[in-house]
Amino acid sequence: MDTRGIDQMLGELRASSQVAAGKTTQETQASDGVAFGEVLQTALEQVSAAQKEAQGMAKDFSAGDPNVNLQDVMVNLQKANLSFQQMVQVRNKLVTAYQDIMNMPV
């Protein structure tokens, strides 16, 4: 899985946290030209594609396709599982960041 999108998303979260804490700088105000929502959407699409590919390979293997071997199916299933778990952790971090921002005194 390409982690550039997740790294950029975490950078956006840190910048938002600094802005919310009143530590505005030119760096936190500068935008890389990519919207946070677009990065998140791309990451979700990548996870979904990995899961669909793994499920397709598993279905092909169970149907008896001679071009699909068990090792590749298992590796792709594990990759899809790990990418899903990673997205769950990112979601948890986003929820925690949102709760922290909402609990800040105004």
Image (cartoon, grey):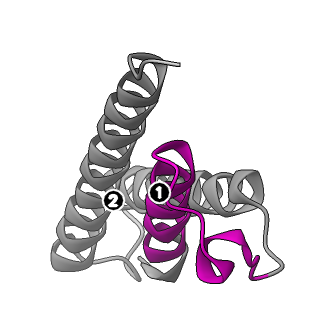
- Looking at the image, is 8 positioned above or below residue 78? below
* Residue lying at 32% horizontally and 31% vertically, measured from the top left: 96
- Observer able to see residue 2: no
Q: Is residue 13 left or right of residue 49?
A: left
Give 12 or 27, whichever is nearer the viewer.
27
Q: Amino acid at mark 1?
A: Gln
Q: Which residues are magenta?
A: 6-32
Which quadrant of the view contains residue 58? bottom left
Q: Amino acid at mark 2?
A: Ser
> Residue under circle 1?
18
Which quadrant of the view contains residue 32? bottom right
Q: Is residue 19 magenta?
A: yes
Do tag 1 and tag 2 residues touch (Cβ < 8 Å)?
Answer: no
Q: Is residue 95 left or right of residue 92?
A: right
Q: Which mark is residue 83?
A: 2
Q: Please, what is the dominant secondary structure of the magenta stretch?
A: helix
Q: From the viewer's perspective, is the residue at label 1 or at label 2 nearer?
A: 1
Circle 1 SS class: helix
